[in-house]
């Protein structure tokens, strides 16, 4: 067990009202859930919400309490190149590694219980089915409150489906549950007997980037396009996220294959890694579009990608509140997405995005073509989307809601 203590790392605070929190996660890559964890780690200790924000929020009853967070990370002993862990180290966050020999290593129970007690952790916050299952047992043994954030389910194979069922059965024993969309809350309430008041919906949030001058924006856009082999006047569809079955990227590639004959300057950028990458690359070759589809792999910094896109495409079969959606909106990138999960509660069709039914490849292609061939529509959708993020999905409001959940668990 690799331990890094609280006092020598970024985010540590001293004081009599210090509350020690451990976030627990089994990272697959540096995806949406992992980036949510990093945002909580970055901002949970900030006084009055996110520093630098100007939102006028009511001073809460727990004002003056310092939440000091560290990260508990389950990593398989053979996984030496974990992108999430690299990011944690680069940012200098306090963390502890619980090494796994196999999927559910019982030794982790003993390690985690000991860590919670030895380091006087006062609240555990879990993310993902493995962390939920192990975390609820250990938190109960350590007699501390425990919060779970439900980011959504993948059900990629029979084993994961089994673990996710166990996760669902464990949820009634949590002190509080955060669902990243109303649809996730409704799913849990319908699946298991649980008090709906225990589940709080807190949609994800992002930092709103500053607007760039048109000249600087154009220069940056051209530079990124040149880096990835596209001309300044190319039409670029982008996807940002994990390459896994529930993202249904096969439909996106089919839609792109329909558009290329109509839009000769079209390119598609697939940003991210995942178990489906080789299958998707083969599909692109079989469709005859591999020269127009660029698999950019994992990109540590995605903000420059958004500045070079004409449209962000989401073809998922299931979602929570995808960070890539909010990020694209914050940069004013128009979005075409399937209406799944919490996406329909964020995007208003025809106002700040275009929505299609999942599995409808023709509708997906036609909607992307509408945006790509109508600059006025693209500008309107992008500006409306950016304004919606500014009003409803700011980090300051988000972190205050999470702090409020923490406090409610501690004061009971």
Image: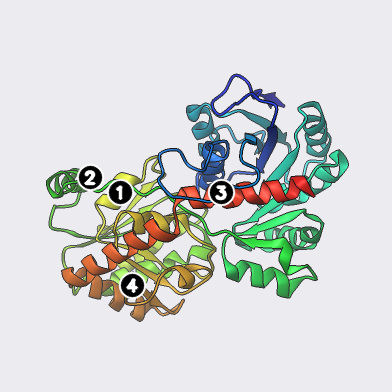
Scheme by which the image is coloured: rainbow
* 259 relative position to 84: left or right: left
The residue beneath circle 3 is 400
Which quadrant would the N terminus be assigned to in this image?
A: top right
Residue 52 position within the rendered picture, expressed as x and y whole percent measured from the top left: 40, 39
Asked whether residue 281 is in view, the answer is no
Q: SS of the residue at dot 2?
A: helix
Neighbour tally class for label 2: few under 14, some 14-19, many 20 plus, Cα within 10 Å: some
Mark positioned earlier in the residue sequence (2 or 4): 2
Q: Are marks 1 and 2 in contact (CB under 8 Å)?
A: yes
Q: Quadrant of residue 315?
A: bottom left
Neighbour tally class for label 1: few under 14, some 14-19, many 20 plus, Cα within 10 Å: some
The residue beneath circle 1 is 305
Q: SS of the residue at dot 3?
A: helix
Q: SS of the residue at dot 4?
A: helix
Neighbour tally class for label 4: few under 14, some 14-19, many 20 plus, Cα within 10 Å: many
User: Which of 398 and 271 lies nearest the eye of the viewer?
Assistant: 398
Mark positioned earlier in the residue sequence (4 or 1): 4
Q: How far is mark 4 from mark 1, CA to CA?
A: 21 Å
Nearer to us of marks 3 and 1 is 3
Q: Which residue sits furthest top?
A: 8
Q: Residue at x 68, y 58 (%)?
A: 160
Q: How far is mark 3 from mark 1, CA to CA?
A: 29 Å
Q: Residue at x 53, y 36 (%)?
A: 46
Residue 134 position within the rendered picture, expressed as x and y whole percent measured from the top left: 77, 46
The label number, if any, that marks residue 224 in the structure image: 2
Q: How far is mark 1 from mark 2, CA to CA?
A: 7 Å
The residue beneath circle 4 is 255
Mark positioned earlier in the residue sequence (1 or 2): 2
Q: Are marks 2 and 4 in contact (CB under 8 Å)?
A: no
Mark positioned earlier in the residue sequence (3 or 4): 4
User: Which of 204 and 16 lies nearest the eye of the viewer?
Assistant: 16
């Amino acid at each position: 067990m690799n331990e890094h203590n609280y006092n020598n790392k970024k985010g540590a605070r001293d004081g009599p009202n210090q509350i020690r929190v451990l976030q627990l996660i089994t990272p697959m890559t540096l995806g949406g859930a992992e980036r949510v964890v990093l945002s909580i780690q970055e901002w949970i200790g900030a006084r009055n919400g996110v520093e630098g924000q100007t939102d006028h929020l009511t001073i809460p009853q727990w004002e003056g309490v310092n939440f000091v967070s560290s990260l508990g990370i389950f990593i398989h002993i053979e996984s030496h190149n974990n992108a999430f862990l690299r990011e944690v180290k680069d940012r200098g966050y306090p963390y502890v590694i619980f090494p796994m020999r196999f999927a559910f290593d019982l030794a982790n129970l003993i390690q985690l219980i000991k860590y919670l007690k030895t380091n006087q952790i006062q609240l555990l916050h879990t993310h993902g089915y493995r962390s939920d299952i192990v975390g609820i047992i250990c938190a109960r043994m350590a007699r501390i409150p425990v919060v779970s954030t439900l980011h959504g389910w993948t059900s990629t194979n029979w084993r994961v489906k089994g673990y996710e069922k166990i996760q669902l059965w464990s949820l009634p024993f949590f002190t509080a549950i955060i669902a990243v969309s109303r649809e996730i809350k409704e799913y849990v309430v319908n699946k298991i007997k649980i008090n709906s008041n225990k589940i709080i919906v807190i949609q994800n949030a992002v930092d709103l980037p500053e607007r760039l001058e048109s000249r600087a924006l154009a220069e940056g856009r051209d530079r990124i396009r040149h880096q990835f082999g596209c001309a300044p006047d190319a039409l670029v569809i982008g996807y940002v996220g994990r390459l896994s079955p529930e993202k249904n990227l096969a439909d996106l590639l089919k839609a792109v294959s329909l558009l290329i004959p109509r839009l000769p300057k079209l390119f598609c950028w697939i940003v991210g890694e995942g178990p489906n990458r080789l299958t998707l690359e083969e599909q692109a070759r079989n469709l005859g579009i591999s020269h127009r589809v660029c698999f950019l792999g994992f990109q540590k910094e995605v903000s420059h990608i958004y500045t070079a896109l004409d449209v962000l495409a989401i073809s998922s079969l299931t979602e929570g509140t995808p960070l890539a959606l909010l990020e694209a909106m914050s940069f004013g990138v128009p979005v075409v997405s399937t209406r799944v999960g919490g996406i329909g509660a964020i995007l208003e069709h025809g106002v700040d995005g275009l929505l299609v039914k999942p599995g409808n490849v023709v509708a997906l292609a036609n909607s992307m073509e509408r945006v790509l061939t109508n600059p006025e529509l693209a500008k309107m959708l992008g500006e409306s989307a950016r304004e919606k993020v500014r009003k409803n999905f700011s980090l300051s409001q988000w972190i205050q809601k999470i702090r409020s959940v923490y406090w409610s668990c501690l004061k009971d």
